[in-house]
Each structure stands twice: as C-alpha cells, then as structure tokens.
Image: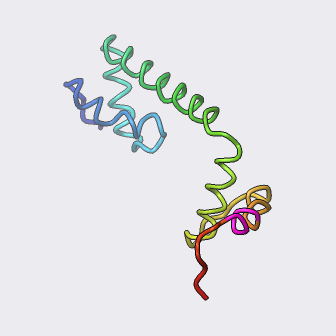
Amino acid sequence: MTSPLHHCKDCVDLLGDYVDGSLPADRAKALEEHLSLCPPCITFVRTYKATRRLCRHALEKEMPEELVNSLSAFLGKHVPGFTCSKSDTATAPQLAATDAGPKKV
C-alpha cells in the first residue's frame, strides 16, 4: 500500500525524480494520486516540465559550434574517460597548434 502525500511540499520534493522517471513506482503512484486531487500541483508539474523543456531547447541553440568543438577537444584531452565525436577530435590538433603558451617537455 502506498503512503499518501498530504502536503504539496512532499510532491515538490519528488518532482525531479518523477519527471525523470526514476521515482520508485509506489512513490510515483502516491504522487499521481495527490495530483489527481490538487489542481495547483498539476499546474506546477506542467510548468516544471515546460520550463525544463524550454531551457534545454534554448541552451542547445545558444552555444556556437566552434565553442562546442573546442570544449569537447579540451575535455577529451584533459578529462579521463571523456569521449567526443569525430568532428570534435578533428579540431583537437588544430587547437593544440594554435596554443601560443610555452611548452614543457
């Protein structure tokens, strides 16, 4: 049997995991039961989902391709286990060649 959520704050605390799909089934059911009776929480969930979607969409478009490539190349060089796409690795030698700093041997 699921434990009911009587307070909206309890719902807000679970929302991130619920939207990501990582909330355990019993807690998700309790949240959904609360949502079926609480219009303000339904509105909050819809707004939360829309905000995440809009932010993700906006952030994808704002970073110039050149910055994505140089960042990926840098991370690929300096972060163990970081993988980058073929287009990113193609720019890595160019970035190394343009580094004007002194080289240690």
> 88 or 34, which is in the foreground?
88
In the rendered view, would you say 58 is above or below 76? above
The residue under the point 24% across, 35% down is: 3
Quadrant of residue 101 in the image? bottom right
Q: Which residues are magenta?
A: 94-98
Give the residue at the far top of this rendering. 39
Q: Is residue 95 magenta?
A: yes
Q: Quarter of the image containing the C terminus? A: bottom right
Quadrant of residue 81 in the image? bottom right
In the drawing, does residue 7 fall left or right of residue 44?
left
- Coloration of the structure image: rainbow
Q: Position of residue 73 (x, y in %)?
A: 66, 61
The residue under the point 76% across, 67% down is: 93
Q: Quarter of the image containing the N terminus? A: top left
Give the residue at the far bottom of this rendering. 105
In the drawing, does residue 81 fall left or right of residue 2?
right
Which secondary structure dominates the residues rendered in magenta? helix
Q: Is residue 77 magenta?
A: no
